[in-house]
Amino acid sequence: MILRNLSILFYLFFVCPAFSQPLQSPVRHVVVIGVDGMSPDGIRKAATPVMDQMMKEGAFTLQARSVTPSSSSSNWASMIMGADVEQHGIHSNDYERDNFILPPVVHGKDAIFPTIFGILHDQKPNAKIAAIYQWRGFGRLFEKSAVNYDTCTANESETARIAAAYILKEKPTFCFIHLDHVDHAGHESGHGSPAYYTSVAKADSLIGQILAAVKAAGIADETLVVVSADHGGIGLGHGGLTLAEMEIPFILWGKGVKKGVPIPTPVYQYDNAATLAFAFGIQQPYAWIGRAVQCAFEGYAVPANNYPVITYVEKPDFKPSAFQNRRAGGLFFGPTTLNILNPAGSGELRFTLDGTFPTINAELFKKEVVLGQNTVARCGVFRDGQLVSEIADAYYRFLPKGALPQVAYRCYYGSELKNLPNVRDLKVEASGKCYELTSDGLKLPRSEDVVVVFECDLNIEAAGKYTFFTRSDDGSTLYIDGKKVVDNDGDHGVTEKAGKIDLTSGTHEIRVEWFNGGGGGWLDTYYQGPGVPKQLIPAGVLKG
């Protein structure tokens, strides 16, 4: 019985998140700087001397994970609520306190899931708490009653200026700062573009401005500074499950933090709030699932049962390369060559040409391969017999020389679109023909508040169950013979959804509807069935 009781106490105080021990010497001030859309790639490739110095002087990981979906509302909520979507219920950017689908598991102050703002106010009533944010949507995610200073700013420069002035004057207990311009650059110019890296460099300079205020206020020795993000991105959007979208930075600097130490444990978005509670020496709610990243602090060892985080190398690069949301490969009028580069610089490339997952037993890539028929190529980097990269995919589609486009499309205009409208109520603004069921290469009269309907026939060789997919930003639907098979509607980033249908061999009508409300838009469509690996629906099976 004594041993059993000791085991229970050990679990409660050293394992269970709700009973984790506070920092031995709690901090007096915490500043969190959240940079919307800032990926680890941005920090690695942009000029970021301030964050580089913070990592040298603090603890960090560039492999923390977002929650899904990798969109802003869900992740900012998880960051401050210590929980995932299934607990707090903030499922998308459409969430409002009076308009939601999934209710929160528990209510804290202001009838929302408890946040670090609320529990800090409850346990330290005299704490001075501030929220300074560029994205207005952040303001609906925390308890207004817990905050002494709450302001939404016009731009990133004003955000940093106001935050620096406030820190210098008020020396707040907790100040949360949100910068939004990096996400804007990702949506407007593309993640990984020169404009994107320039925006990350500006974020770094603004972080430097805020750090300078902490030092000028004379509180640097008593302050923990956290730099993180809600999500990364790919192409012009985010919301999916790629590492480019899901991996985020997590940098700790200041009071009690180990110096120049990479964090070896997994870090999840909801661990942010738990780490703040730990640093403040306050109790986190039992409803939180986050765990404090204790091993980042002096006096706390790496857990004995820790599995080290896997470091993935850059995935292989097919030629023609993927660009933004466009998949690698392409549509060709005659044979082409498949070539694969290894950006990782070491290891070996193993690939398949039938859509199957490459393993260590897959063919070793040594030289270019000539292709002349529809091919789904997949490749990974292997070292010492282990896969050490994401799998890269490429889709090669072929048509005879001189083949004409077979897919008819019609373009309509909407107004402040959030869902697909009934196009029967709209006027056709443009029409034409294209080769495939994709937005790639379409010459649209305008790019926002636009609806496009694609129609043609689909040739099915083998009867059986088929799965169809649309991958779109914003919403899309796919119909076969008038039956809705895929419902991917709504205002969202690049998101893939699927549906199944039994088809006979022969010709079937296919119709795809897609809209883009604002920002970057995208659509492509896939299918999979008997003898057909998942692939972009190739032009060769589409007939007018």
Image (cartoon, rainbow, N blue to C red):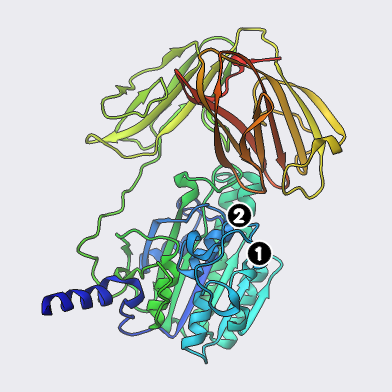
Pointer 2 residue: 183
In the rendered image, the vertical position of residue 359 relative to residue 280, given as above or below: above
Q: Is residue 117 above or below residue 495?
A: below
Q: Which one is in front in this view, the residue at disc 2 or the one at disc 1? A: 1
Compare residues 395 and 93 and report the one nearer the observer.
Answer: 93
Q: Secondary structure under badge 2?
A: helix
Residue 118 % position (x, y) = 53, 80
Q: Quadrant of the N terminus?
A: bottom left
Determine which quarter of the picture holds residue 169.
bottom right
Residue at 33% across, 20% down: 366
Residue with the most extreme top position: 401
Residue 36 seen in the figure = no
Crowding at label 2, few (<14), some or many (≥20) Cα neighbours within 10 Å? many
Picture coordinates of residue 363, whole percent (x, y)? 31, 21
Quadrant of image for the C terminus: top right
> How dense is the environment of label 1, judged by Cα within 10 Å: few (below 14), some, or many (20 and up)?
some
Q: Residue at x 59, y 30 (%)?
A: 525
Rendered image: mark on residue 96: 1
x and y percentages locating residue 230 in the rendered image: 52, 59
